[in-house]
Structures are given as C-alpha cells and as structure tokens.
Amino acid sequence: MKINVKLAKFNALPWPERRTLLAAAALLPLFWLGLHCFGLRRLQTWLQLRPSPTNAGLSLAEIARIATLVNSAAGLAPIPATCLTRSLLLGWMLQRRGVTSQLRIGVRMNQGKLDAHAWVEYEGVPINDHPNVGQQFAAFDEILPPGAFESS
C-alpha cells in the first residue's frame, strides 16, 4: 500500500483512534524488548503492578476497535510484532482503560510441528483474532513454568 493511502487512512481516523494507533506503534517495540529481556512472567507481573481503574464502560465494539488499532500498529512497528507482543500490549492498554481481559496462549500440531499462538479474550470472546481461534488452538488455563515441557 502506498504511503499516501496509509496517510489518508490515518488522517480519516478520529483523533482518539489516531492517538491509540500512535501509542501502540510506539509501545510495541518496548513490549517486544521487555518480553525478550525479562520473559513473559516477569513482564506480566511488572505490567500489572499499577492498579487499573474500574468501570470502563466500553462496549465490545469499542474494545474490538482498540484491538484492531493495535493489530494495525504492528504493520508500522520496526520490530517483528508477534502475536504475543501484540496481545500483551492490547491487554495492558485495556487494563489501563479499566477493562478486564484474559491473555490466552494455545498450541496445536500443524504438519507434525508444534505451533503456539497468543490472543486476548474479553468475556470469553477473542477480540484481536478470529472468533474460532480457541477451537483451533488448545489454550492453557495459566502460563506454565519454564521447565513444564522438560522430560524427567
């Protein structure tokens, strides 16, 4: 897509959505770096230190729109914005708005190889992925410790 088309689409967004898109594009590299430097569990613990407001009052459509903006920002980021990086950022952005969401990590076998995928759910509904992602991947109920897959 040409830069003029992207710029026109950006300019067509309402200011709050532009701000969200720009924030997500700026934060994705920091989340990627945090994930690679500290690991998932430590990064999640750090992200949850600040108490979040309650009663966000956002509709499912508004929450899904934030997810779409984060996914769009991934195309602008100078780093590989993986599903886990995007999902961590989305969960944090929602938390800052008082929305409780759940990070889901699942696995599946694909042509003899183990695939992993991450997404965010709000009230059991995937918001940054397709609706049946939970049927395609077996999701963990909680993040497993690093040695969980080592054989004894």
Image (tube, grey):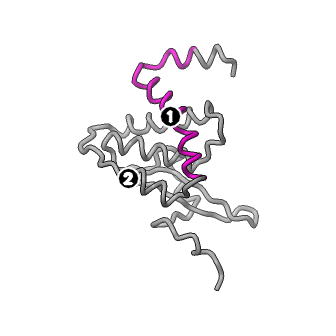
Circle 1 SS class: helix
Q: Quadrant of the N terminus?
A: top right
Q: Residues within 10 Å of mark 1 (few under 14, many from 20)?
A: many
Residue 27 falls within the magenta-colored stretch: yes
In the image, residue 118 above or below residue 2: below
In the image, residue 44 above or below residue 96: below
User: Residue shown at 49%/48% (left/top)?
Assistant: 88
Q: Position of residue 137 (x, y in %)?
A: 57, 60
Q: Describe residue 59's horizontal placement relative to residue 125 as left or right.
A: left
Find disc 1 in the rendering and name its residue.
Answer: 24
Circle 2 SS class: loop
Q: Position of residue 147 (x, y in %)?
A: 59, 74
Residue 22 falls within the magenta-colored stretch: yes
Tell me the quarter of the picture where residue 74 sits: top right
Of badges 2 and 1, nearer the viewer stands: 2
Find disc 2 in the rendering and name its residue.
Answer: 48
Q: Position of residue 144 (x, y in %)?
A: 52, 69
In the image, residue 111 above or below residue 5: below
Q: Quadrant of the C terminus?
A: bottom right
Q: Describe residue 84's horizontal placement relative to residue 124 as left or right.
A: right
